Image (cartoon, coloured by chain):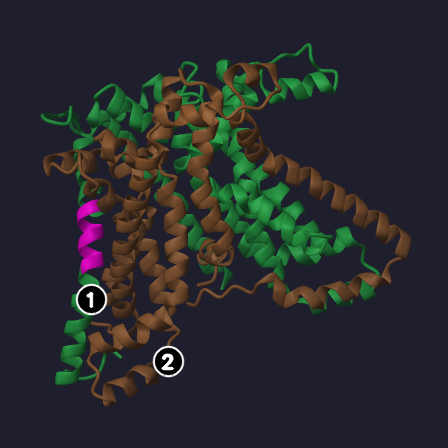
Chain colours: A brown, B green
């Protein structure tokens, strides 16, 4: 059940050798063409970032004219969109949701892997099956339920939904991870007089930090970029996340494009930074569904 | 472990297991399980969020004979046509990167970058790209097609194409990474043997690499289909708002529109249940595919 991912680095040396059989010149031209193609694709993939950066440093008039440089749009951004507060809201909502997801899924994963009880497989399957439920299918009753609990004007309504949507996959991943720990390790700890809670906290949890980081990164990018749940469950403008603030602005269609682009950039930067630091963990999380 | 006799030790382990898995179960049950049951019930009522009158299963019949519903399903079907593109292009890119082109690590990072960026931001830029005064028309003018002057987002059919193109663009990174990961697990010795036997690059790719990547291609395919059905809400919200007309309203967007713009919570719940059925079917098909592989 382990989610093992062999990275490219492992094969780096193995694959270079076989190529030298073909004629040199043909090979070199082929490689140059491939390199050029990759550059073209890189430009296509990077275009939005370049567009956001270049547009945000223009005024609306300069943007239409197609040239010029100005910091005006960045100054206007603060009046149009409370970026500081909304970024803070995004951080709070992400942190609360991810904390709940990790707390709940590590405990459950440990129980399903190492503390199996009668019907534990059934409970596990019920939780995993919830992965099939699209958020759009539950959002209407969930919205009414949360509004009846008076949680639409707090962070908690959105946090509960984000957490519940994240827990099934996180539990799947953690169960797989804990199954790969040898039983002898736990039995030895038991002999030493550690209780099950102690084994979990002092042995299993520290060993599973890589899997926890993977879940954290994956969920951060998902929750940070979510619009639908934030739009519905964060009714109080003071609690809106940056993605929701931006989405609401775009629907109004009155804002100047350079200002919108400055806002987009602000909302994209934290996720891009997390991505650049944790690229490897993110990839692991993405392909974890393949290896059973 | 579970089948041993009930010693005190086993009993305390069982208790710990139940206690530790309880929070996950309760959270999922209350926030997902109960709402999906409620949705199934309210889908057969005339519900406005406060009061509901019972209609019965005929509510489904009524919706299934609604032309707008089929217009929306048509949009979903058309979007599915973009899935093969979102598989084939990344396969090609991954194959080239896997040849260790100069700077491939850098390229990999750049291609994967959109995965980190929200659909809202992608939609913001894409709307400017496809706009009348946007980059697309500039590019067309540059290659001598300036007379076309498209305004894709205000045309009922072309708007969906614009959404599809943006969707494919954003899936390229994720799928490329999936295939690269797959290629790293390939058995290099068969490739070596084929090369020694004089097989060309294309033949090796077609007959050896692709079959070995089958699981990864299936996985990417299913993930892309799921995204096409359930991940495009923000993109549509930002780029077109579902229009012009119903031109870009997909099922997931229709759920939102029906419930929160029109206040028809019952019909919205019904559409959500239909979406759930489609997703469940795809999920089961995937499970079956994985099973038959072993």
Magenta span: helix, strand or loop, mainly? helix
Q: Residue at x 41, y 65 (%)?
A: A210
Query: Is residue A181 shown left or right of residue B191?
Result: left
Q: In this rendered view, identify the residue nearer to me: A202 or A81.
A: A81
Q: In this rendered view, identify the residue nearer to me: A129 or B230.
A: B230
Disc 1/disc 2 C-alpha distance (Å): 20 Å
Label 1 neighbourhood size at 10 Å, few (<14), some (14-19), many (20+)?
Answer: many
- Residue A36: image quadrant is top right
Label 2 neighbourhood size at 10 Å, few (<14), some (14-19), many (20+)?
Answer: few
- The N terminus of chain B - image quarter: bottom left
Farthest residue, direction top: B147
Residue B25 falls inside the magenta stretch: yes
- Residue B41: image quadrant is top left
Cβ–Cβ under 8 Å for marks 1 and 2 = no
Q: In this view, does B23 lie above or below A34?
A: below
Residue that mark 2 sits on = A182
Query: Is residue B279 shown left or right of residue B173?
Result: left
Query: Is residue A262 shown left or right of residue A105?
Result: right
- Residue A146: image quadrant is top left
Q: Where is residue A208 in the image (x, y as percent from the top left)?
A: 37, 69
Q: Which residue is drawn at 67% across and 57% down?
A: B209
Residue that mark 1 sits on = B20
Q: What secondary structure is found at the residue carrying circle 1?
A: helix
Q: Residue at x 26, y 60 (%)?
A: A103
Q: In this view, does B88 lie above or below B261?
A: below
Q: Residue at x 32, y 19 (%)?
A: B66
Task: Identify the subunit bearing mark 1.
Answer: B
Magenta range = B23-31
Check chain identity for marks 1 and 2: say if they share one. Answer: no
């Amino acid at each position: 059940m382990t989610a093992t991912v062999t990275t490219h680095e492992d094969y780096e040396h193995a694959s270079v050798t076989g190529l030298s059989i073909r004629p040199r010149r043909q090979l070199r031209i082929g490689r140059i063409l491939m390199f050029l193609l990759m550059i073209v694709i890189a430009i296509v993939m990077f275009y939005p970032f370049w567009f956001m950066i270049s547009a945000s440093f223009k005024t609306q008039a300069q943007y239409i004219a197609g040239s010029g440089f100005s910091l005006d749009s960045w100054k206007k951004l603060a009046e149009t969109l409370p970026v500081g507060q909304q970024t803070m809201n995004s951080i709070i909502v992400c942190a609360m949701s991810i904390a709940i997801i990790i707390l709940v899924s590590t405990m459950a994963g440990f129980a399903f892997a190492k503390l199996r009880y009668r019907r534990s497989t059934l409970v596990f399957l019920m939780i995993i099956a919830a992965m099939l439920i699209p958020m759009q299918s539950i959002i209407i009753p969930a919205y009414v339920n949360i509004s009846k609990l008076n949680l639409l004007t707090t962070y908690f309504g959105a946090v509960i939904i984000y957490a519940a949507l994240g827990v099934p996959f996180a539990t799947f991943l953690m169960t797989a991870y804990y199954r790969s720990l040898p039983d002898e390790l736990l039995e030895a700890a038991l002999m030493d007089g550690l209780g099950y809670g102690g084994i979990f906290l002092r042995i299993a949890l520290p060993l599973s930090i890589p899997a926890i980081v993977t879940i954290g990164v994956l969920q951060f990018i998902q929750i940070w970029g979510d619009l639908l749940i934030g739009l519905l469950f964060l009714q109080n403008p003071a609690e809106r996340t940056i993605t929701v603030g931006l989405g609401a602005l775009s629907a109004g269609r009155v804002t100047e494009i350079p200002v919108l682009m400055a806002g987009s950039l602000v909302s994209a930067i934290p996720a891009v930074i997390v991505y650049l630091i944790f690229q490897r963990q993110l990839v692991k999380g993405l392909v974890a569904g393949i290896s059973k | 472990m579970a089948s041993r006799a009930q010693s005190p030790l086993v009993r305390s382990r069982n208790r710990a297991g139940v206690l530790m898995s309880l929070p996950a179960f309760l959270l999922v049950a209350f926030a997902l399980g109960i709402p999906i049951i409620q949705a199934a019930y309210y889908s057969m009522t005339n519900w406005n969020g406060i009061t509901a009158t019972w209609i019965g299963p005929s509510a489904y019949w009524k919706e299934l004979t609604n032309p707008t519903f089929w217009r929306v399903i048509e949009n979903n079907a058309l979007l599915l046509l973009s899935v093969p593109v979102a598989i084939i292009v990344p396969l090609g890119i991954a194959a080239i990167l896997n040849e260790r082109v100069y700077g491939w690590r850098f390229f990999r990072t750049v291609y994967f970058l959109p995965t980190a960026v929200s659909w809202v931001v992608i939609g913001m830029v894409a709307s400017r790209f496809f706009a009348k005064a946007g980059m697309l028309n500039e590019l067309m003018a540059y290659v001598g097609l300036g007379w076309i002057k498209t305004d894709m987002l205000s045309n009922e059919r072309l708007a969906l194409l614009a959404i599809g193109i943006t969707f494919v663009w954003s899936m390229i990174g994720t799928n490329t990474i999936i295939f690269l990961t797959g290629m790293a697990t390939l058995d290099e010795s068969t490739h070596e043997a084929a090369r020694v036997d004089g097989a060309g690059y294309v033949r090796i790719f077609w007959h050896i690499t692709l079959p070995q990547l089958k699981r990864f291609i299936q996985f990417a395919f299913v993930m892309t289909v799921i995204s096409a059905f359930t991940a495009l809400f923000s993109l549509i919200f930002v780029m077109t708002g579902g229009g012009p007309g119903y031109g870009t309203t997909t099922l997931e967007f229709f759920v939102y529109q029906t419930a929160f713009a029109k206040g028809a919570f019952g019909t919205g719940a019904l559409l959500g249940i239909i979406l759930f059925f489609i997703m469940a079917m795809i999920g089961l098909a995937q499970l079956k595919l994985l099973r038959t592989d072993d």
